[in-house]
Image (tube, rainbow, N blue to C red):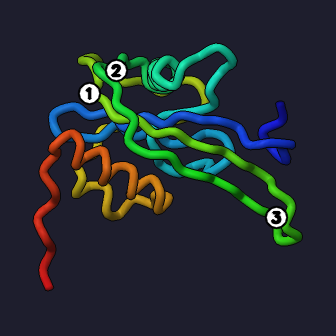
Amino acid sequence: MRREYPDRPIVGVGAVGWRDGRVLLVRRGKPPRVGQWSIPGGAQELGETVEEAARREVREETGLELGAVAVIATVDLIDREPDGRVRYHYTLIDVTAEAATGTPRPGGDVDAVAWFTLEELTPLELWSETRRIIRLAAERQAVPSPAPGPG
């Protein structure tokens, strides 16, 4: 199936991986959102469970394995052209998990991988839904929230 201008939505998975209170992010090397930081993820393959897809995508994009996986949310990503045509349409199922030890390395369709504290996310250009999903995952994982800023 075509990813650009598809004839139906594509199911994708995203994984919010944690280690020592830091979240694992990848920088996208391909559209949509090329050049932006995001959680690892991609399209679910035929015959693959959501958990299997999340584990495979994290392994392909970062070289890391995940611990116990829990579903936290679903997101609709619909990117329309000015004339209304749908350029991309993904139904994303997001999970959270602890990431196994090891050094992440970029692979697949990403060009960088890094760990971030919640405070370090503030200046990054992140899709609003990515920020929301990370907040939900942090609550589930009991990651301390950043201290309030001045003002």
| Residue ID for mark 2 | 66
| Image quarter (top left, top right, bottom left or bottom right) of the C terminus | bottom left
Residue at the spot 56% in from the left edge and 42% down from the top edge: 92
* Residue 76 x/y as whole percent: 60, 52
| Gap in angstroms between the C-alphas marked 1 and 2 | 6 Å
Under circle 1, the secondary element is: strand
Residue farthest along the top direction in this orientation: 47
Q: Earlier in the sequence, mark 2 or mark 3?
A: 2
Residue type marked 3: Glu
Q: Which label sits on residue 37?
A: none
Residue 103 shows up from this direction: no
Residue picked out by circle 1: 98
Is 13 placed left or right of 117 in the picture? right
Q: Is residue 33 visible?
A: yes
Mark 2 secondary-structure assignment = loop
The residue to which callout 3 is attached is: 81
Around disc 2, counting alpha carbons within 10 Å, would you say few (fewer than 14), some (14 to 19), or many (20 or more)? many
